[in-house]
Amino acid sequence: TKPVLMQITVSGAIMLGEPNVLKIDYMPVCSSSSVKTYMDYRAITSVSSKQYQFIKANMTVNEKGLLVDHNGYVAVALGSFFKEIGSKYIFTLDSGVELKVVKADEKSDAHTYSGCGQRWDGSVIEFIVNKEKAMSYFGNSSNGLVLNGNFNNSTEFKGKIISIERVGNNDYW
């Protein structure tokens, strides 16, 4: 059966098209950065870490080299501003792009401003990828990085962050 769209008056949440998923109130935009870096998922090596366990249990590599869950949310590293591993968000960009992401790794507070943007490049979103597969799909840049190290160089991910929504009913924890 098809889920029914309904408004829930408590905190203004709205039921999305996915079963048991709530779109929660907007969060403050901690940075409007357009920079979107990446890391290879194999850099997460501590098998007892929540990040490693989360990726192993919930993520698969798609044809673009992105790690995605069963609902199409893309794995990213975010700062501590974005709560726990497994938290889901929808980032809306000024280009109209909506990025459905799940926090699968956490950037160190020592490397971010207030648990948000990276100190040296301003990135909020760091995609977690299979580098070889991403390079094969997006192409090899002259500097040896996927999309010159910035996924904003692809129209699929282009734009500055204009809104952030946390998606409720965490599937994972």
Image: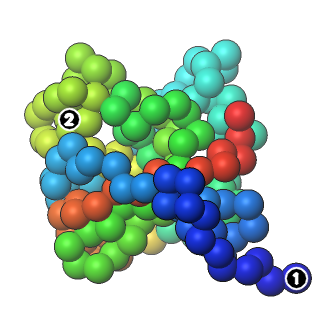
Please state the horizontal and vertical placement of residue 3, each as a whole percent of the image.
Answer: 76, 78
Please state the horizontal and vertical placement of residue 51, each as a whole percent of the image.
Answer: 57, 29
Q: Write the residue at 20% across / 73% down.
A: 94
| Location of residue 165 by image quarter | bottom left
Residue furthest to the front? 9
Q: Which residue is mark 2?
A: 118
- The residue closer to the viewer here, 61 or 94, is 94
Q: Quadrant of the N terminus?
A: bottom right
Q: Which residue is mark 1?
A: 1
In the figure, 142 relative to 76: above or below? below
Mark 2 surroundings within 10 Å by alpha-carbon count, few (fewer than 14), some (14 through 19), many (20 or more): many
Residue furthest to the bottom? 2
The disc labelled 1 sits on which kind of residue? Answer: Thr
Q: Write the residue at 62% across / 24% down.
A: 50
Mark 1 surroundings within 10 Å by alpha-carbon count, few (fewer than 14), some (14 through 19), many (20 or more): few
Instruction: Mark yes or no: residue 22 visible.
Output: yes
* Of labels 2 and 1, the one closer to you: 1
Horizontal arrangement in the rendering, residue 15 relative to residue 122 (left or right): right
Horizontal arrangement in the rendering, residue 89 relative to residue 170 (left or right): left
The residue tagged with tag 2: helix, strand or loop? strand
N-terminal of the two: label 2 or label 1? 1
| Location of residue 119 by image quarter | top left
The disc labelled 2 sits on which kind of residue? Answer: Gln
Q: Write the residue at 32% across / 67% down.
A: 92
Please state the horizontal and vertical placement of residue 152, each as a whole percent of the image.
Answer: 23, 64
Instruction: Mark yes or no: residue 56 visible.
Output: no
Q: Write the residue at 50% across / 53% down.
A: 11
